[in-house]
Image: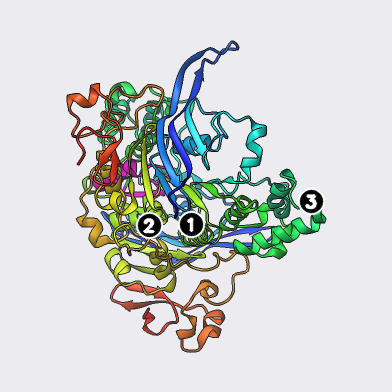
């Protein structure tokens, strides 16, 4: 892992307009899905991004890849600012940044064969065609299929002929096709059965080492994130509330939300599970259209003080962790 | 005499590709106040088993055989292949079910009050006011604040966790003796999952319900179940008390499941994350059409070479479900099933 960052995000925001339901749609408000997040990703590093549904983690991942136009903030990729690049100027960079989606069923075109799906990346970027024709693409695709544990002879099969775990491997092969440097993994194993999940996690681990990849690993399953990440960022309502090295965050969480989140995970061991001290959070996530003033977590925090309702805490250093809390644990 | 006794339950779906044996001779029993977890991967038959008990499988699509006797308040009832009219009297009253997806299992056009009141009215010959009061009582019990005025709210006005609470309130409105919870927390976030599991535990203690908990999450099982049945390819492959199963899994599949989950409580130090590779189970679950005569797990099993008679025996004959330790059953040819 080198110290020069492959990705840097500064105060990134992504707001979605909320419009009224009439023909003359008026903007009534804004859904503040990502509300000012900053972090860096080093080359060869895996950063886990965790949080509950609606916290903005997937939006963050997609905005970083400029699949959504950022509302404000800056994104640097390999030292170059890409925040306002046009799609045409983004295209050469796209070979270096890829995404693996959560749902292996809806992210593959059912009418395209596996060969076409994986090979599309080469065709779109005009790689391999001029020099040696489609034969070279087929060979490259079959190499990739073998690499992710698919049978290369299944080149002409369609997605419905594969199981969930195999489809996720197709998605991974597609993301790897152009030898990217950086991959956003958006809940890549959430839709898979436990025994298959482990296979895919191991594959992602191997590929990272072989191809020298950096991952932004988005997931809600904290045990999977712990397994794969070097550092972990916890998001709540569009903000990063804690960012720390994996060992640190799991052994000594500083933000009350991180603490509650970790304590809520059931341990697959009945003896320890019954002895586990659990913080059950009351209430639900506030609406991202109208986040609480002050600290975003103040509506559910058991140690909120008057200051938490008036003043928003900034991410600041507590030991080796960055924590956004006025009263860290 | 157990409260519910299921014997040799079979559910088969004839399809154009062949006969799908979704549930292939399943037997188990459960007492009141007990929680039985059924664990397995997608397609292992855990949901179909319970849909059969609830009489929710179309008789035209599914062939159901075997027995399931419930000895409850309504007398002894044989649940399998009950006439529609009879099952309707029991379903929602003596047996209730919570489904996985709270988004699609509530009717979007009716207020949640109407839906809960209807569930009560169907089984009780009482005034609507009585049912309304009961609905408020239940919503209160599952922790929905300001229950009286929330009766008029529609499902879309609730969050996922709140909708699951509404589902639970509706399931419990007639104080069922048996509650079937099919992945009740899978669609929910961990913090909400913790709330719902705690709620189910409290309600069970209060109402002395038997709960069948269907899940693939072994963490949930560890915290919520008394006994566990592990299913694979339509059969129960291991059955034991929850502590015994986690401490001493006898069937290689259970062993594989337990070791393939990343653990937050046990982790080896290394350069990044927990570093160590997960021990994944190779391959994937078999197709339920034309299952081999032997153990369905044999093609993925790494212990077949230790079986007396070797892999040929595993591939050739289906091991019976044997009691290897007191109340600990496993379906494996391995001598004394010692892993």
Nearer the N terminus, badge 3 or badge 1? Answer: 3
Q: Which mark is residue A50?
A: none
Query: Which mark lies nearer to you, 2 or 3?
Result: 3
Chain at tag 2: B
* Residue A49 seen in this snapshot: yes
Instruction: Please provide percent x and percent y for residue A196.
Output: 50, 60
| Image-based side of A87 in relation to A126, left or right | left
Labels 2 and 3 positioned on one and the same chain:
no
Q: Quadrant of the C terminus of chain A?
A: top left
Estimate how packed mark 3 is, as few (under 14), some (14 to 19) or many (20 or more) residues with alpha carbons within 10 Å.
some
Residue A147: in magenta span:
no
Q: Which residue is mark 3?
A: A129
Judged from this view, the residue extending furthest toward the top is A24
Chain at tag 1: A
Q: Quadrant of the N terminus of chain A?
A: bottom left
Q: Which residue is pictured at 53% across the width and 50% down the height?
A: B57
Q: Nearer the viewer, residue A329 or B307?
A: A329
Colour mode? rainbow
| Image-based side of B144 in relation to A115, left or right | left
Q: Which mark is residue A193?
A: 1
| Image-based side of A20 in relation to A130, left or right | left
Q: Nearer the viewer, residue B191 or A29?
A: A29
| Image-based side of A9 in relation to B338, left or right | right
Estimate how packed mark 1 is, as few (under 14), some (14 to 19) or many (20 or more) residues with alpha carbons within 10 Å.
some
Estimate how packed mark 2 is, as few (under 14), some (14 to 19) or many (20 or more) residues with alpha carbons within 10 Å.
many
Q: Quadrant of residue B129?
A: top left
From this view, report whether residue A66 is shown above or below residue B202.
above
* Residue B75 seen in this snapshot: no
Q: Nearer the viewer, residue A193 or B136?
A: A193
Instruction: Please provide percent x and percent y for residue A202.
Output: 48, 62
Q: Secondary structure at mark 1?
A: loop
């Amino acid at each position: 892992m080198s110290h020069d960052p492959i990705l840097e995000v500064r105060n990134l925001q992504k707001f979605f307009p909320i419009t009224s339901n009439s023909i003359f749609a008026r903007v009534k408000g804004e859904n503040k899905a990502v509300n000012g997040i900053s972090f860096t990703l080093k080359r060869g590093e895996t950063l886990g991004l965790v949080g509950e549904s609606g916290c903005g983690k997937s939006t963050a991942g997609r905005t970083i890849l400029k699949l959504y136009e950022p509302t404000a903030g800056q994104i640097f990729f390999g030292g170059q600012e890409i925040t306002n690049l046009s799609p045409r100027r983004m295209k050469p960079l796209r070979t270096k940044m890829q995404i693996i989606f959560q749902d292996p069923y809806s992210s593959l075109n059912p009418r395209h064969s596996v060969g076409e799906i994986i090979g599309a990346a080469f065709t779109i970027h005009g790689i391999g065609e001029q020099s040696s024709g489609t034969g070279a693409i087929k060979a490259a695709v079959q190499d990739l299929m073998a690499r992710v544990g698919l049978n290369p002879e299944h080149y002409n099969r369609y997605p419905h002929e594969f199981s969930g775990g195999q489809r996720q491997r197709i998605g991974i092969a597609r993301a790897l096709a152009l030898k990217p440097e950086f991959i956003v993994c958006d809940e890549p194993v959430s839709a898979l059965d436990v025994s298959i999940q482990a296979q895919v996690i191991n594959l992602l681990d191997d590929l990272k080492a072989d191809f020298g990849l950096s991952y932004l690993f988005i997931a809600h399953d904290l045990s999977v994130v712990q397994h794969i990440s070097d550092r972990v960022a916890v998001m709540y309502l569009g903000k990063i509330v804690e960012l720390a090295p994996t060992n640190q965050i799991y052994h000594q969480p500083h933000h009350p939300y991180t603490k509650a989140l970790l304590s809520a995970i059931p341990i697959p061991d009945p003896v320890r599970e019954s002895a586990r001290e659990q913080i059950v959070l009351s209430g639900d996530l506030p609406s991202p259209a109208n986040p609480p003033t002050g600290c975003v977590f103040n509506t559910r925090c058991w140690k909120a003080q008057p200051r938490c309702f008036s003043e928003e805490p900034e991410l600041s250093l507590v030991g080796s962790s960055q924590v956004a809390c006025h009263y860290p644990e | 005499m157990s409260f519910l006794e299921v014997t040799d339950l079979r559910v088969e779906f004839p399809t154009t590709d062949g006969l799908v044996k979704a549930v292939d001779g399943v037997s188990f029993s459960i007492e009141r106040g007990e929680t039985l977890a059924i664990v397995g991967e997608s397609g292992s038959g855990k949901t179909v088993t319970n849909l059969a008990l609830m009489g929710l499988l179309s008789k035209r699509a599914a062939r159901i055989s075997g027995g399931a006797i419930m000895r409850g308040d309504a007398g002894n009832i044989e649940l399998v292949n009950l006439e529609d009219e009879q099952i309707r009297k029991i379903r929602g009253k003596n047996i209730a079910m919570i489904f996985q997806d709270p988004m699609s299992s509530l009717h979007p056009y009716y207020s949640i009050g109407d839906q809960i009141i209807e569930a009560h009215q169907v089984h009780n010959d009482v005034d609507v006011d009585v049912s309304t009061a009961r609905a408020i009582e239940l919503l209160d019990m599952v922790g929905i604040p300001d229950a009286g005025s929330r009766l008029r709210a529609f499902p879309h006005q609730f969050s996922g966790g709140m909708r699951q609470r509404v589902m639970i309130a509706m399931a419990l409105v007639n104080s069922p003796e048996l509650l079937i919870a099919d992945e009740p927390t899978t669609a929910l976030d961990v913090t909400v999952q913790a709330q719902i599991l705690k709620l189910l535990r409290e309600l069970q203690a209060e109402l002395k319900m038997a709960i069948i908990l269907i899940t693939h999450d072994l963490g949930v099982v560890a915290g919520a179940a008394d006994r566990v049945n592990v299913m694979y390819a339509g059969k129960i492959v291991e059955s034991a008390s929850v502590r015994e199963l986690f401490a001493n899994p006898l069937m290689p599949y259970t062993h594989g499941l337990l070791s393939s989950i990343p653990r937050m409580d046990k982790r080896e130090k290394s350069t990044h994350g927990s570093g160590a590779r997960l021990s994944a189970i190779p391959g994937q679950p078999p197709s339920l059409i034309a299952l081999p005569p032997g153990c369905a797990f044999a093609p993925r099993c790494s212990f077949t070479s230790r079986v007396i008679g070797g892999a040929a025996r595993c591939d050739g004959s289906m091991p019976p479900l044997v009691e290897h330790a007191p109340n600990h059953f496993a379906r494996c040819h391995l001598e004394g099933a010692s892993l």
